Structures are given as C-alpha cells and as structure tokens.
Amino acid sequence: MASKNDPFQFQEFEEAGNLLESNRDAVTISIEDEDLKSKRQRSAVGFAQDVGDEEPLINEDREELLSGQKKNAPFWTFEYYQKFFDIETHHVKERILGSLMPWPGKNFIQVHLRKNPDLYGPFWICTTLVFAIAISGNLSTFLRYFGNSNYKYTAEFGKVSIAATAIFSYAWLVPLGLWGLLLWRSNKILNLVSYSFMEIVCVYGYSLAVYIPAVVLWIPHVEWLRWLSIVVALCLSSSVLVMTFWPALRDDHPKVIIATVVGIVLLNGLLAVGCKMYFFNEPKLGPLHVSPPEAKTNRTSS
Amino acid sequence: MASAEEASRPFAGLSDVSISEEIPVEGDIAVPVGPSTRDDEFSTLDEPVKETIVRDLRAVGNKFIHVLYPKRSSALLRDWDLWGPLLLCVTLALLLQGGAADSDDQGGPQFAEVFVIIWFGSIVITLNSKLLGGTISFFQSLCVLGYCIMPLTVALIVCRIVLLSVSGKVSFAVRLGVVIASFGWSTFASTAFLADSQLTNRKALVVYPVFLFYFVIGWMILTFSPGN
C-alpha cells in the first residue's frame, strides 16, 4: 500500500547499474544496463571520441559482460584450455583466408577473431610449417645432387628439432614481448584498444600460414623464384600484423610507433631469411664436397 | 493382557518350547562361504601363463584384422589395449635403423626419435581431439592411432624387400606407390574410428592432424635408404 514497498518502482535499475560498475565480472545480462554502463564509462573518461571508435567499444563492453562466464576456470584445469578450441571448420578456414589476403582497414583481430581467439590454428599451422620446412629442405638437397652417384641420400632428421625450436619460439616469445610492450604503453597513453595475450598469439600463428606455400616454392633451385616468394610472403604476413596493431599504436609517440612497426617487420623477415639460409643452403656447383666420414664409406664400398 | 502381549510378539508360540539341560547344545554356526560363482568365472589368477598370453595375443590379432577391414565396428574402441601399438612402434623404429650413414649425426631417424614422434604425436592428436569436445577417451584414441600404423609398417617391410632386390628408378616408383597406398589406408582406417566421435562441423579439424601424423611417418619410410 505504501509507495516505498511498491515492487514496480524503477529504483532497481539504478542499483543494478551501480552493482555492475563495481563488479565487472558480474554475470547479469541485460541490454539496458549495458547501455547505461557504457554511457557512464564514456562520460567518466571525459574526452570525445570519433564515431569510428564507438562501435568496437560497445561491442567490447557487451562481449566482455557476456563472456564473463567464460573466465571462471583456473588456468591449470582442462576446461580453461577447452574454451580456446571452441571453433568450427569454417571459422578456421575464414581465419586462414583472412591472413592470406589482408585488406586495408580490416583488422584481423576485430574482423575474424571477434573475441574468440583459438589455439588450434596457431599450433597446427606452426607444426605444419616445421614439417614443411624440414621436408622441403630435404627434397631440395636431394634434387640438387640428383644425378650425382657420389651422393648418399640422408634424411637429415636433426633439422626438424631445430626448425621446431625456431618457429615455436617466434610464435610464442614475440607475442609475449609485444603484449608486454602494449601493456607498458597503455599505462602511459590512455588507450582503449587493448589486445589480450591469446589474441596476439592467434594473430601471429595465423600470419605464419602464408609461409607454408612459400616454403614449398623453395624446393626447385631457382634463386629468383625463392627470393620472390620470400618477398611476397613477407609483405602479406607483415601487412596483416601491422594492420592489426596499428589501432593499438596510432595514439602513441611517433618514435614508439616506428620502432614497433619496424621491429615487427624485421623479426618476421629474420625468421624467413634465416630459415632459407639454414635449410636451403646452396653450395657452389662443381666437384661434390663430401664430408670425411662419407668419403671413407664411399671408398670402402667401391 | 499378557496373552495379548505374547500374541503380538513374533515367535510367540515358541516360548513354550524348552530344551532340557541334559542335552548338550552344540553345532557348527559357521556359515559355509564358498566362492561366489560370478567371481569364479572372471578370476584369471590361477590359469597357466600360456593361456593368458594366448588370450592377449588373440585380442591383439583380432584388432589387427579390424584395421585391415575398417568397418564401423566398435571392437577397437571397447577393449582398448596398448600392446599392439607398442609392438608396431618398436618394429617400425627397429626397421628404420639400418639406414645409410648410421654413424653420422645427420643420418636417418634414431630409434628414440621415431619412438618420440609416434607416441608424442599420438598424445598430441588425442589431446587435440578431446579439447575439440570429442567423446572418445584418452586411451581409446591412443589405441586406435597406434593400431592404424599397421599398414605403414607393412609398407616399410615391403620397401626393405624391394630395396634388397631392385634398385634405381623402378624401386623408387614401387616404394612411392606402396607408401602412398598404405598412408591412405591408415588415414582412412583411423578416421573411420575417430571421426564418429566428433561433431559434424569439426570433423575436418580432427582429421587434419591425423593426416599430418601419418604423412610424416610415411615420409620417414619413403626416405629410408639402406646402408652398406
């Protein structure tokens, strides 16, 4: 009867809004609260934003609230990692195609990942690349000495472990460094575009996909073809990475932007050229240089 | 009142029966507990060792036949065992041993390398399948992947025989054909068992690592060249 006890009073929305602000991981989902919350956040931040930034902000808020349920498992349980494999075949196909054909303005993380980074793509692309490099290197050495009767074919199996170390450390340590860098800069610059570590690992993993056909093209001993494929693969891969990290960097000090972009491209190029030099080295044409143990076995056999 | 009480108590009528003190009351109150018949049938502790081994060998041989004719039967999945995979893995690693430049550092794969690739590869594929939400259990998947290496082992034996007799381009063509056929057979056999346990829209994601695994093993077999 009293108006204070009226259950249909609209005070409840205010309380829920306050509760949500204090506890961001709350599992409550309601569209009106999200709009209130995002409006409050924008007004609290204080400066005007251009229209282009508003869309991803609202999407990030909504999806962070909706995905609050995902983050409950501690990192030592199986369920924690299961949420990184929550993708389907067509998602993986889209992501690989998106990394092969970068489009200016299409940020890989925002367009393809959509807050659902996966570990399937990066892991299996890196593994495929390791074996592709080892097998292609083996094939190209074999083709090099094909008609030569002095050459005893060996499988050169030790190179697989070296390739694996190089590629997996690139795919994990560089994203770690980049994530740390972005975290450090976000303390100094008020930056609302932030990427989680898994998203950065995901982008780096998918950006290596373009090297798999490039490595296959390195098999025949045609120098210009090899360098051409390296340059094309480097351009595609680096442009995916640079376009992804540009929104996170563009508000920063110009020196930091240039240093970071140059660092990304340089490390990428170092990986490509290093792999080519080590696995596909070209001894000069001429008398076949055999190492002493092989020469001994050849002499004893003939 | 007393009689009503007595009537309501169970065994009320027996209170009249009494045993005289002269007759000693004795007997055996131990309840004879024989072995329950259910346990007896499955208890294999007392059988001769030969019987145990023959039974296990028969189970392994049965599974080999299932790999040869991969129908959608669930025998491989229900009674998984790791004897067959171990046998095949050791055979494969031993046969890949007598390769050229065995004393070199960069020769053919060492025994440990083959072992690690097969077992570590199987474990990674199983983890991948489980993370993608597969319903197959860990050891069942290891069992299936291990047994499906059998066609590739057979191919390696054939390759070694071919290398002993023929040489040159013909031998390479024959070996290539045999390895490709057995690689296809292995992949087909294992996906017949594994793909059923996945959702339709993730089948390709589970099949691709299996394809890569058998491709690498097939590559190791194809590039095997005997020493002198």
Image (cartoon, coloured by chain):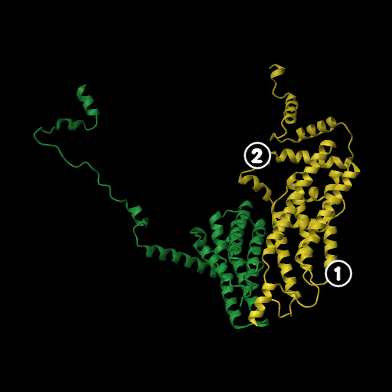
Chain colours: A yellow, B green
In the rendering, at what x and y percent does residue A175 appear?
76, 48
Q: Residue at x 89, y 35 (%)?
A: A48
As rendered, which of A33 and A112 lies closer to the eye? A112
Q: Nearer the viewer, residue B19 or A236?
A: A236
- Circle number at residue A72: 2
Q: Residue at x 72, y 71 (%)?
A: A139
Nearest to the eye among marks 2 and 1: give it. 1
Task: Determine whether A141 is above or below A27 in the image.
Answer: below
Relative to residue B9, is residue A39 drawn left or right? right
The reply to whether callout 2 and callout 1 are in contact (CB within 8 Å) is no
Chain of the residue on which disc 1 is drawn? A
The Cα atoms of the two marked residues, 2 and 1, are separated by 53 Å
Neighbor class of circle 2 (other Cα within 10 Å; few <14, some 14-19, many 20+) is few
Across and down, in percent, residue A92 comes to 73, 56
- Which one is nearer the viewer's eye here, B47 or B133? B47
Q: Quadrant of the N terminus of chain B?
A: top left
Chain bearing mark 2: A
Residue A115's mark? none
Is residue B173 among what the camera can see?
no
Q: Secondary structure at mark 1?
A: helix
Q: Position of residue A178 (x, y in %)?
A: 79, 46
Question: Farthest residue in the right direction?
Answer: A254
Residue A224: image tag: 1
- Residue A96 lies, in percent from the top left, at 76, 57
Say if residue A74 shows up in the picture: yes
Tell me the amino acid under the disc marked 1.
Trp
Depicted B162 relative to depicted A273: above or below: below
Residue A214 vertical placement versus A42 (above, below): below
Image quarter of the C terminus of chain B: bottom right
Q: What amino acid type is highlighted by mark number 2?
A: Asn
**Which secondary structure lies at badge 2?**
helix
Give the number of callouts.
Answer: 2
